[in-house]
Image (tube, rainbow, N blue to C red):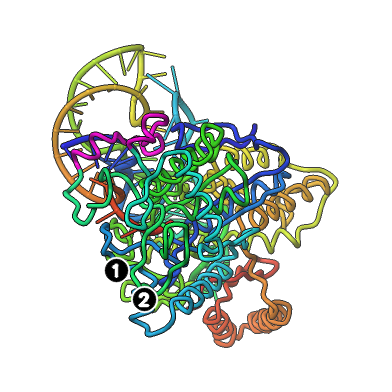
Amino acid sequence: MPLTLYNTLTRQKEPFAPLNPPYVGMYVCGPTVYGDPHLGHARAAITFDVLYRYLRYLGYRVRYVRNITDVGHLEGDTDEGEDKILKRARLERIEPIEVAQKYTALYHKAMDALNVLRPSIEPTATGHIPQQIAMIQRILEQGYAYVVNGSVYLDVEKYRQDYPYGILSGRNIEELLAGSRELEGQGEKKHPWDFALWKRAEPTHLMQWDSPWGRGYPGWHIECSAMSIHYLGVPFDIHGGGLDLIFPHHEAEIAQAHACFGKEAHYQARFWIHNNLVTIEGQKMSKSLGNYITVEEVFTGSHPRLVQGYPPMALRFLVLQAHYRSTLDFSNEALRGAYRAYLRLMNAYHRLLQVRPHAYSTYMVSSWRERVFAALDDDLNTAAALALFFQQADDIIKLYRGELLLSQVDLELLLKTWQEVLFEILGLLPLQSVEWERWQRLVQLTVRLRQQARAEKNFALADCLRDELQRVGVKLLDFPDETLWEVGERA
RNA sequence: GGCGACGUGGCCGAGCGGUUAGGCACGGGUCUGCAAAACCCUUGACGGGAGUUCGAAUCUCCCCGUCGCCUCCA
């Protein structure tokens, strides 16, 4: 079965096939770097990280472009709004570019911790002003934009005569207009739904560039069109982002692509993929509401709503346990559950590494493996795929103890599936650290000492050792003939 | 007001016409020096109502509720 993905554009799952196999062009809207990376950033990054990893696993040569937005995006919806990065710069009393650099670094740090692979290309908006200007110029030449007072706007009314505006979001312009609030400060535009491609800058505006229309800065949506098309051509295979970007951001991108390149642009991308949002106790998390939890806070537990901190993989696992198109409600309980579940799987993996093959198998591995990949192929159903691993986790200790048997071939296939899916595709990290080997030997020694104490009926000492091990996060499994151990939560 | 999504057992979360999802937590039992783990067993679910169907958590309609987008946001 081929990989199928839900396409927002067509509102259905479609088999994925690249335009120019084996190459795949994928563009994902990255962060606007003016604040600490939060749970929403983590979810989006992990979602598309898994898609990226899976496409590569399937043998595609993927060029993955994820931008850094380091300019523009006004606070309000009027011409007088303040650029968010500039506002941050003013608050922190640093240069705008320092704001961008600082938060880009924090974003990278957080994503690295979550084992999110860096994209092939990570372009910045400020680094691609010429491409944006060129695109705007061409849109003007095609007659789909107009210049007013040093600003350039996309003429949606004109565009609608030739292309469907609202195709991605399912929006109807008349209704949109009727239902929208009265907006102030839009005097320059011919119609309220026109949007800026280029904005005239006041002399005091800190970030501005020369353009054919005077000093100014790019509009809200042009950077993604310009950069994606610059690196991937048009149309390209996959365009991704958060659900909240569908309108107006992605709708505007499609319009810009058509306005610039005509029907050849073909909705800019074949597949439009959107991940759902993270909620906190059922409520939307957003920068503007100020109720967001940062990735760093999850690690340290230093947020009023967090009971304690958890390692990065707990968060990654939590994200993976939900389908990317469902909302994910974040809570202490959910995070704790995810961490425990992660530990259980990783302990099973380490046990699996120690299993010895036998002459024959007592159960089938290949059919299980097929079901795992069928889940991934079904619109990246990571939750269903993980569920299948828990099924196996129960059997691994039996394999280890010889209560179930696998042949060399089956055992290798099982191990390969665990490694490929859990680590390579889902991007989880195993428990090992640089200290793992040394740590393991110390635990082993302590376990043996306890066994000896038990043999001598020195239960006080034996229980003391057990409690101490528990405190550093070692869980003991006593069998009649041996004692095994695995990694648990720290007491 | 328009567009869209969703309501699944204590919590999280798959399923999209008929088979146990799964995870976390919980109860009883076996085992154990005591525990843990394991195993066995049990409990407990599909917001409400009507309809389609041999059969619905899954399709249709209505109602209730929640959330998102329509303004920057992943």
Callout 2 secondary element: helix
x then y, percent, for residue A35: 41, 72
In the figure, is residue A249 to the left or right of A130? left
Point 82% across, 45% down: residue: A409
Residue that label 1 marks: A290
Residue A452 visible in the picture: no
Point 56% across, 43% down: residue: A238
x then y, percent, for residue A169: 37, 39
Identify residue type, mark 2. Arg
Identify residue type, mark 1. Gly
x then y, percent, for residue A347: 62, 64
Query: Which mark is in front, 2 or 1?
Result: 2
Region in magenta: A157-179
Q: Nearer the viewer, residue B48 or A48?
A: A48
Q: Quadrant of residue A459?
A: bottom right
Mark sitting earlier along the chain (2/1): 2
x then y, percent, for residue A203: 35, 73
Callout 2 crowding tier (Cα within 10 Å): few <14, some 14–19, many ≥20: some
Q: Quadrant of residue A400?
A: bottom right
| Residue A7 drawn above or below residue A321 | above
Residue A250 visible in the picture: yes
Residue that label 2 marks: A88
Quadrant (top left/top right/bottom left/bottom right) for the N terminus of chain A: top right
